Image (spheres, rainbow, N blue to C red):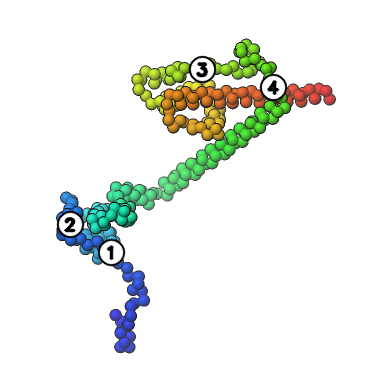
Amino acid sequence: VRVVNGIPPTGDYSFAKYNKSVDIVKYTDEEYEKYLTDPGWTKEETDQLFDLCGRFDLRFVVIADRFPSSRPVEELKSRYYAVSRAISAARTPTSGDVSANHLHKDTYNVQHEIERKRALSMVLSQTKQEERKDAEVLAEAKKITESRVIAKAAEEAELAASSSVIHEINERFPIPVGSVSPSSNSQLPVGAVAPTPPTPDSALIPNTLRMLRVFLRSNALEQMVQAASSSAGLRTIKRVDQTLQDLGVNVKPKVPTKAVCAEHLELRKEILSLLNLQKQVWESFALIVLSSLKFMVVNL
């Protein structure tokens, strides 16, 4: 206290309000024997730890330096929070009050803290060359993500354009009812797709799984989808997946039972046939337009 002109200061120091101290848990000998015994800690060590926590306001780096035995900071923290949590649970009458306490909501995880410090040490000890390499990897990952987004947008635009063209063709060139007889494949026009006969479920199961007595049906479905789409290109397969999403159907069934897998495969086949028909209609329309242009040029 500084005395000015023989007059001692009155009232509190102006910055005394910032001198906050941590409320450290106090426990009795009975509570220690009942709740706090630990084979790795003696009562004297626990008392010393809590005394240092009160003196240095939970500055565990300083506490570890002053602690008599050589224990890491994480171990001191773990013991302090474990004791505080046990005393809080013992003194709280209801379980609802215990769950609301921050000591019980956010428990201290020693392994997570050690891993966090190790990862932070690795990041801080990186050389300039390693930092540049990480930056290049992140930039490349960003480019890949952007290219995927652009490709998906282009594919959606192409699907929308093809749908509008097919709709326009159906309006301009309506097919008369009964003009094509579906009774025989021999009566189909050139270039048309013949309906495929249903394939038994057992015939679609790959040989690698058919030899096993027990296997995951979801795994078998994945291989059956690959086998059924082997003749189609990667772009067509993506369009099939996109059509499934547009219809609100999962690309992979959540409950892959035998009936669900069979229906899923049948739907994929129908979508694939539809896409092939759309492609043929588009090619036919292009030929019609080209023939019309040639006819107009000849008659000029």
In the picture, measured across the screen, residue 140 lies left or right of residue 215, that is right
Q: Which residue is drawn at 22% across and 54% down?
A: 71
Q: In front: mark 4 or mark 1?
A: 4
Q: Distance between the residues labelled 3 and 1?
A: 76 Å
Helix, strand or loop at mark 3? loop
- Label 2 CA crowd tier, 10 Å (few <14, some 14–19, many 20+): some
Label whose residue precedes the other's in the sequence (2 or 3): 2
The correct choice, above or below, for 108 with respect to 170 in the image is below
Q: Which residue is drawn at 46% across and 31% down?
A: 252
* Type of the residue with mark 1: Asp
Q: Where is residue 228 in the image (x, y as percent from the top left)?
A: 50, 22
Which image quarter holds the C terminus?
top right
The number of numbered badges drawn on the structure is 4
* Type of the residue with mark 3: Pro
Q: Which mark is residue 23?
A: 1
Q: Which residue is drawn at 38% across and 49% down?
A: 123
* Type of the residue with mark 2: Tyr
The correct choice, above or below, for 15 with respect to 258 in the image is below
**Residue that badge 3 annotates:** 198
In the picture, measured across the screen, residue 75 lies left or right of residue 264, that is left
- Label 4 CA crowd tier, 10 Å (few <14, some 14–19, many 20+): few
* Type of the residue with mark 4: Ile
Which image quarter holds the N terminus?
bottom left
In the picture, measured across the screen, residue 110 lies left or right of residue 155, that is left
> Is residue 263 visible in this depiction of the protein?
yes
- Label 3 CA crowd tier, 10 Å (few <14, some 14–19, many 20+): few
Label whose residue precedes the other's in the sequence (3 or 1): 1
**Residue that badge 2 annotates:** 32
